[in-house]
Image (spheres, rainbow, N blue to C red):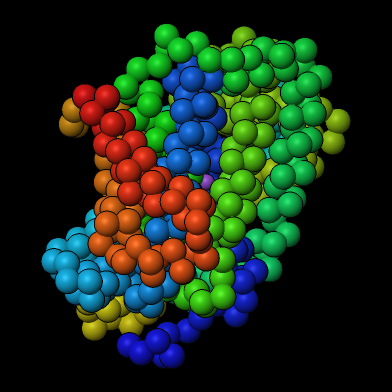
Amino acid sequence: MSKLAHAQWSSKMTFVLAAAGSAVGLGNIWRFSYMVGDSGGAAFVLVYLICVAVVGMPILVAEWLIGRRAQKNPVNAMAELAGRSGQPRAWALLGASGILAAFLILSFYSVIGGWSLSYTLNSVTGTFTGQDADGVGAIFGNLLASPGVLLLWHTAFMALVVWIVARGVTKGLEGAVRTMMPALVVLMLVLVGYGMTTGHFGEALAFMFRPDWSALTGGVVLAAMGQAFFTLSLGMGIMMAYGSYLGEDVNLLGTARTVIILDTVIALLAGLAIFPIVFANGLSAGEGPGLIFVTLPLAFGNMTGGTVLGLMFFLLLTFAALTSAISLLEPVVEFVEERTPLTRVMATLAGGVAVWALGIAALMSFNVWNVPVLFGLNVFDLLDTFTSKILLPLTGLGAIVFVAWCLERKSVADELNLAGGAEKLWHLVARYVAPIGVVLVFVSSL
Ligand code: PFF
Ligand code: NA
């Protein structure tokens, strides 16, 4: 496909919104807070922040750069750029492993998206009003214990995703993303404000930012790095695919900074909202994937205007989850569309049904099939662990190694508008610090 034939983003803003729509999602609120709680707090948070800055930022830029140069889907992009620079076409495997990761992640992401949908309905019907910790615990427990109900919500969420992707209205969502992001930030601030009234805000601050380094194990470091990849949508070819629609005029480093700051701020606010509630109600920070679903309803059920705020929150969360899920399904659909005679609608249906089916195994991990299937993990934990801790970092590592070692240094510097000391710093980080960081994290977790 020629460069001209490949459509481009109508404006820089459009691209920023799409990238932010993919990045900001359940990862920031649901996954970040439960991982922080599971891993014992501040040490995890600090390693996560370091990973975002030192590994996430260069890899995000590398993925965009690859996509923009090749103007193709991730598999073809890697094959083409590798060919151009005299490297083996096996680099295309990077694109393929990204697509696999997107497929696996969406299967369990949709299950949690379903929880969010279900909590949106619970908010409308006032289910949380006046509940105490036992009450909200029971509501969540009942949801988890009912595979049929979970299936219903998972199906509803996946159906929404498939419907949006099949109709190709993804672009139409940008306006919505533009209003949703600020609204989400404002609501998180309101929740942080509520956290301050619980009398346990200081405890939450200390939990999140005063590290107990003795809690820092190789496993925690790997989990923090995995979270950094997950939350920035890295290592999945998604950012690469977005880069392929990007015009020459977009400043990659500046845009990466914007997206990363937004994503990180929302995650930190989520933590500051959730942990005061945990400590004020004697809940367990290590509750696991249910953490936001047994804490936030307590706030909504007991604060003035909580019903409306709760409804708004779960609607926004569902919407953020949808825009991320769409970005996960896109590469799968594009792949099926290019490799089979299926039309876009049929390709979307086929991809969606496959993801949905795997999601059923994931949701049964919370009830009838909560048994270890491999490495002592149930299907849900296996999908989450295998993707975030192995597949994403390896794919991201490939992207940064390719840009820093296989592409011509001068051309990369020009493309990033870098010169002098700034260029040297980029080169140092991209060539050594980020890749060695990823490898060290792997080694330390063994
Ligand atoms: N980054 C999204 C989040 O934090 O919720 C999740 C996600 C979306 C991961 C798209 C990966 C991806 F390709
Ligand atoms: Na995110």
Residue 142 is situated, as x and y percent measured from the top left of the image, at 50, 28
Residue located at (58% from left, 60% from top): 255
Which sits in the foreground, 351 or 62? 62
Which sits in the foreground, 81 or 291? 81
Position of residue 250 relative to residue 394, above or below, is below
Residue 363 is situated, as x and y percent measured from the top left of the image, at 37, 40
Position of residue 134 relative to residue 158, above or below, is above
Residue located at (50% from left, 41% from top): 53
Viewport quadrant of the C terminus: top left
Position of residue 199 relative to residue 236, above or below, is above
Residue located at (34% from left, 30% from top): 222
Q: Quadrant of residue 91?
A: bottom left
Q: Quadrant of residue 338?
A: bottom left
Which sits in the foreground, 105 or 42? 42
Residue located at (19% from left, 74% from top): 83
Viewport quadrant of the N terminus: bottom left
Residue 307 is situated, as x and y percent measured from the top left of the image, at 78, 37
Residue 214 is situated, as x and y percent measured from the top left of the image, at 42, 9
Q: In which quarter of the image is residue 381?
A: top left
